[in-house]
Amino acid sequence: MIILASDHAGFLLKEEIKKYTQSLSIPCYQTDFRSMLSPGCFMELAQECCEPHSRLLGIGHDELIQFRVVWVLTRMHFRFHKPIFWRDIVSMTTWHKGLEAAQYQRDFVLKNQAGELLADATSSWVMINIDTREFVRRSPIECDDTVCKENAIEKPCERLRVPRDIDSEYAYTHRIAFSDLDKNVHTNNAKYLLWSMNAIPEEVTMHRLVKEVKINFNHETRLNEMIALRRYRLDANAWMIEGLKEDGVSAFVSRIEFE
């Protein structure tokens, strides 16, 4: 059965709902010791913004779960253009760009009250059947007429590969705990970035600001799994972190560049 997303939009015109904006004040619990929005919390804000928009389009969690299908984030690329501080009043705007290379693309921009660009992002998503854990190649709910092709970042986040010509360093091992889990009972995506930041030497993270992040989510992780974090120093400004499961399978790879 195909359900049209426009059936859920009520009296709203399709053009009016292609973009969605959410305004908020940056809370203290999403900032670091400098009172600045942390990279992992930026990911949380983006995820929180896309869910109400997906519901408005008729392709949110509640609509898709009827088909035993959920959204899963596979890749994300975002850039910070200006510092974002505790109590700043900001607006996050998001839109979905449709299917490209078997993944659905969604972009974001974060602006301050003056309309200045603070951060931008692009993300890639797939649909997963929660019973079989298999990819669903096409949405069970038609949503092509709600696509906006505007780009916050022109190209989707690419596949990240750890360098073969740079030796890695073991950082630490993390056991997946209760506080890491999301509503799908696997690790919340923002946690991987939190672990990545913890894997980078503190002389970097305590004194330098994150400029750009790319992250790939390769395999889901679950409660009590052990993830070994290994780091690669790419150059003076950039680090790559890989999280490996006990069987050697890559759970995620991140690339973090500092100013």
Image (cartoon, rainbow, N blue to C red):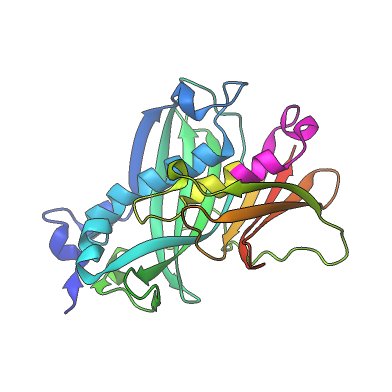
From the viewer's perspective, is 103 left or right of 196?
left
Q: How many marks?
A: 0
What residue is shown at x 43% (from left), y 44% (from top)? 178
From the viewer's perspective, is 164 left or right of 89?
right
Of 256 and 252, the residue lying toward us:
252
Q: Is residue 198 magenta?
A: yes
From the viewer's perspective, is 205 left or right of 74?
right
Q: Is residue 154 above or below residue 78?
A: below
Residue at the front extreme, as displayed? 224
Q: Position of residue 73 (x, y in %)?
A: 46, 59
What residue is shown at x 61% (from left), y 47% (from top)? 174
Q: Position of residue 182 (x, y in %)?
A: 39, 49
Of 99 and 60, the residue lying toward us:
60
Q: Quadrant of the C terminus?
A: top right
Q: Position of residue 110 (x, y in %)?
A: 48, 39
Of 228 and 233, the residue lying toward us:
228
Q: Is residue 63 above or below residue 230?
A: below
Q: Is residue 200 magenta?
A: yes
What residue is shown at x 62% (from left), y 54% (from top)? 227
Of 183 and 178, the residue lying toward us:
178
Taking the image as drawn, is residue 79 in sight? no
Q: Position of residue 94 (x, y in %)?
A: 40, 49
State which region is magenta.
195-211
Q: Is residue 241 above or below residue 198?
A: below
What residue is shown at x 50% (from left), y 37% (from top)? 41
Q: Quadrant of the N terminus?
A: bottom left
From the viewer's perspective, is 179 left or right of 204?
left
Taking the image as drawn, is residue 110 in sight? yes
